[in-house]
Image: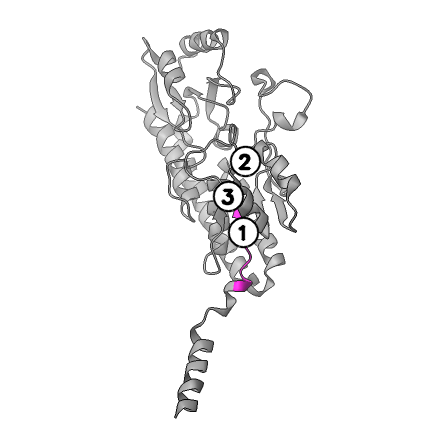
Amino acid sequence: MIYRVGLLHFWMVLLFFPWNVEAVPKVVVSIKPLHSLVSGVMQGVGEPNLLLEGNASVHVYSMRPSEVSMLQQAELFFWVGPQLETFLEKPLASLTNSMISVELIETKGLQIHRYEKKSFWISGGDERNFIDPHLWLDPWNAIRMVQRISQELTEVDPENARRYQENSKFLQQKLKRLDQHLEQDLGALKQKPFAVFHPAYTYLEKRFDLMRVGVVNIHPERPPGARHLAKLRRMMQQNGIECLFREPQFEPRLTDMLLQGTKVRSAVLDPLGAELDAGPELYFTLLRNLGKSFRQCLDS
């Protein structure tokens, strides 16, 4: 009797114990929009860890020991690249593990846009810093990245290759529908001039032919000077700017100063999903929210 009970217990353990847990790779993703895409590809297999929580700004971030430890334990790490997460270069170079680092900005087939030279994001000869790294704001770039994410996950975890591929196909179709939705949402706004807090929206502007004519803060790591603010105020008057967009990661003081005494409307654009819950749906909510903010502020 004891033997039978023991045997029954053994088979119950085999049946219900999640043996495949150890097989799931430890994946870390730098920012919420990318984490959302990776989460979508990994659905039904596991959940990736998110490095930057909350409304942290990638431009002025300083890593905590717990985050360095997270990278040290990771097998696979997805990030845009040093063009965006500059704070990661030294920590990644100092890691002693065999983690695979995937710079998604190197994905084949991406549309890569550069800042207008008159904006001078950074002075000096480092050409990579003239690239706008907010590449996820074009849904077609997201499609290419989903394909790359699926390939990278399949290489480190071939046992779940079929699930990754199925999720990738589903996500790509969903992203195409999102692109069509945004085209309808933003199509009537092509001749409406606006200004933004900092130049994070080149991909959205190029994809949907939006008319950005001014930038409040060219260098997000340091405040703009009085001369630049005076110039932007003149541009707002001369170009008939209808809306000035701010961001939740930054204090509204500068935009409030520019809006004083004008009829220019204001709204929030959140390129990182700072105030959204992380997960597979974040990317879609993020892009729809951006479209909604543009429409409500420019179409009033």
The residue beneath circle 2 is 135
Residue type at the position of mark 1:
Val
Q: Is residue 64 left or right of residue 129?
A: left
**In this rendering, the label closer to the viewer, 2 or 3:** 3
Residue type at the position of mark 3:
Ser
> Compared with residue 17, is residue 94 higher up or lower down, i.e. above or below?
above
Asked whether 61 falls inside the magenta stretch, the response is: no
Q: x, y (%) of residue 256?
A: 35, 15
Q: Is residue 65 left or right of residue 92?
A: left
The C terminus is located in which quarter?
top left
The residue beneath circle 3 is 66
Question: How many neighbours does mark 1 have within 10 angstroms: few (below 14), some (14-19), or many (20 or more)?
Answer: many
- The residue stretch that appears in magenta: 22-29
Q: x, y (%) of residue 41?
A: 50, 53
Question: How many neighbours does mark 3 have within 10 angstroms: few (below 14), some (14-19), or many (20 or more)?
Answer: few
Q: Of all residues shown, which one is farthest toward the right?
A: 125
Q: x, y (%) of residue 107?
A: 62, 43
Q: Is residue 22 visible?
A: yes
**In this rendering, the label closer to the viewer, 3 or 1:** 3
Residue type at the position of mark 2:
Leu
Q: How many marks?
A: 3
The residue beneath circle 1 is 27
* Among numbered discs 2 and 3, the one appearing first in the sequence: 3
